[in-house]
Amino acid sequence: MLLKIRSFDVVSVDRSDNAYKDMIFKEAGIIHFNTGNINLHDIPASLGRPIDLIIEETGSSSVALHSMMVVGNNGVVVLTSITGGDKKMEICSDCFNQGLVLGNRTVVGSVNAHGRDFDRGIKDLLDIQERWPGILEKLITAKYPPEKVGEAFDKMESNIKVVIDFGGNER
């Protein structure tokens, strides 16, 4: 949504087959792809254009790696997730390197934010609320009290955003 309020075309890609999430994306003018129905590498062709920017936040090392192959020439991949474990993949490392260098692709990792970024985040949330009234509330699909945090984790797949509410307002 941050990119949408700055007039970017936005495409969301995940493994979700959630009609409610699709409705929210459609309301905001965001195109959504479910990787259960389309291969990540086929998305640029489906869009009819290359992808200029990928913000990868899945926590999956294979998605991070494939994002670097899918982004278009002169494109940027921003990695914001931490992968866990020791997953291994076999790739043609020369092909991978050539694709990055000859495609003039950039890969950036980011984990920290400055206080002014949080201030900007508040302004962005207010801008989103003004542009799409009520849409932010729709993104929070479940609230749990702290004593039900295990249940919250168990139901992550069926929700968009889960909140642990310390104020006692369970949904």
Image (tube, rainbow, N blue to C red):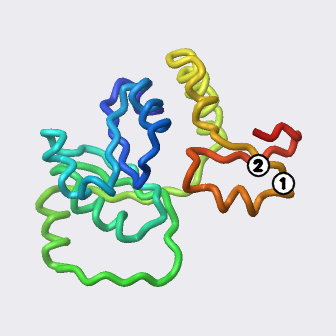
Q: Position of residue 141 (x, y in %)?
A: 63, 40
Q: Position of residue 2 (x, y in %)?
A: 47, 32
Q: Which mark is residue 34?
A: none
Dividing the image into 4 quarters, which one contains the C terminus? Answer: top right
Q: Is residue 106 left or right of residue 123?
A: left
Give the residue type that dot 1 points to. Answer: Pro
Residue ID at (83%, 49%) = 145
Residue ID at (23%, 53%) = 71
Q: Position of residue 136 (x, y in %)?
A: 59, 29
Q: Which residue is mark 1?
A: 146
Q: Is residue 109 left or right of residue 36?
A: right
Image: 169 above or below 87: above
| Mark nearer the N terminus (2 vs 1) | 1
Q: Which residue is mark 2?
A: 164
Give the residue type that dot 2 points to. Answer: Ile
Task: Name the image quarter holding residue 32.
Answer: top left
Q: Residues within 10 Å of mark 2 (few under 14, many from 20)?
A: some
Q: CA distance from mark 2 to mark 1?
A: 6 Å
Q: Is residue 99 left or right of residue 161?
A: left
Depth check: give the residue in front, 73 or 49.
Answer: 49
Marks 2,1: beta carbons within 8 A: yes
Residue ID at (31%, 67%) = 65
Q: Position of residue 131 (x, y in %)?
A: 50, 16
Residue ID at (56%, 51%) = 158
Depth check: give the residue in front, 147 or 109.
Answer: 147
